[in-house]
Image: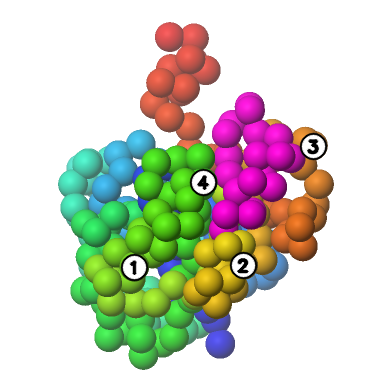
Amino acid sequence: MNKLIIVIGAYGSGKSEYSINLARHYMEEGLDTILVDMDVVNPYFRSRDVRDEFAKIGIEVIAPDGQFSHADLPMLSPKIKWAIENTNKTVILDVGGDPAGCRTLGRYNEEITKRGYEIKFVINTNRPFTQNKAQIIEMKDMLEHTSKLKITELISNANLMEFTEKSTIEQGIDIVQDVANELGLKFDYFLVLDKYENKVPEQIKGKQRFTLKYFLSKPWEQLIMKGI
C-alpha cells in the first residue's frame, strides 16, 4: 500500500525542505506522489512555493489557492481529506511544528488512523527548543499531545548552512541517538544540503545521508539573487 507520511518539526528544523525533497524522491522512484502543505505557521518556508515547479514533473501540491496561496493565514485546502484517504497515491503532509500547526492534524485523526501513517520528526539541534535530549522529548510530547498521533521516526538535521561540517553532523546525531535510545524510536537518516554534501560522508555513526536540494529560499535571498 502507498504510504501516508507526516513530516513535523520545530521552527527552523528544515522539515519543509525535507518534505519537498521526500516527495521528489518518491516520484523519482516511480510512485504517484502528492505533497500536502498543512503549514499554517511559517510564512517564509512553505511547500506551496514549489507548486508550479512540481506540477511540471508530475507531483501534485495541495495548498490554499488563488488569493490565499501566499497568505499568512490558517487556510487549509478542502482536498486534504481526499488526499489522506487516497490510497492510490503516496501522500506527504508537511505540518507546522508548534501546537497551532499540529492541531490541524487533529481534524483528520480518524482518516489518518484508518489509513495508517508514519510521522517523521525532523530535529535540528542547532535551533532553539531542540538543542538537547530533554528539550527534544518535551517538543515530541507536545506535538503528539496536540496532534493526537504518535511520532514513529526521528530525522537529524544539524544544519548550519555554510558552517556545516562533519563534526556538526556528528554532534546532532549523538543527541538525537540519545533520544531514540530512550524512546525506542527509529533513527536512520541525517540531512545535509547538496551545496555542502562534499563536506560530509554518506554514512556517519551508522546513519545514512539524505541530501536535500535547496528549494525554499527566504524572501531576502530572492531579492539578493535579483540584484535588489
Residue placed under numbered mark 4 in the picture: 125
Q: Secondary structure at mark 3?
A: helix
Q: Earlier in the sequence, mark 1 or mark 4?
A: 4
Please indicate, yes or no, whether residue 2 appears anywhere in the rendered image. Answer: yes
Give the distance between the C-alpha atoms of the residues marked 3 and 2, in whole angstroms.
Answer: 23 Å
Q: Amino acid at mark 4?
A: Thr
Instruction: Please state if 73 lies on the left or on the right of 133 as rendered.
Output: left
Residue placed under numbered mark 2 in the picture: 187
10 Å crowding of disc 1: few (<14), some (14-19), many (20+): some
Q: Which residues are magenta?
A: 158-176
Q: Amino acid at mark 3?
A: Asn
Q: Amino acid at mark 1?
A: Asp
If the image is split into quadrants, where does the C terminus sit? top left
Give the distance between the C-alpha atoms of the residues marked 1 and 3, in whole angstroms.
Answer: 35 Å
Residue placed under numbered mark 3 in the picture: 198
10 Å crowding of disc 3: few (<14), some (14-19), many (20+): few
If the image is split into quadrants, where does the N terminus sit? bottom right
Give the distance between the C-alpha atoms of the residues marked 1 and 2, in whole angstroms.
Answer: 17 Å
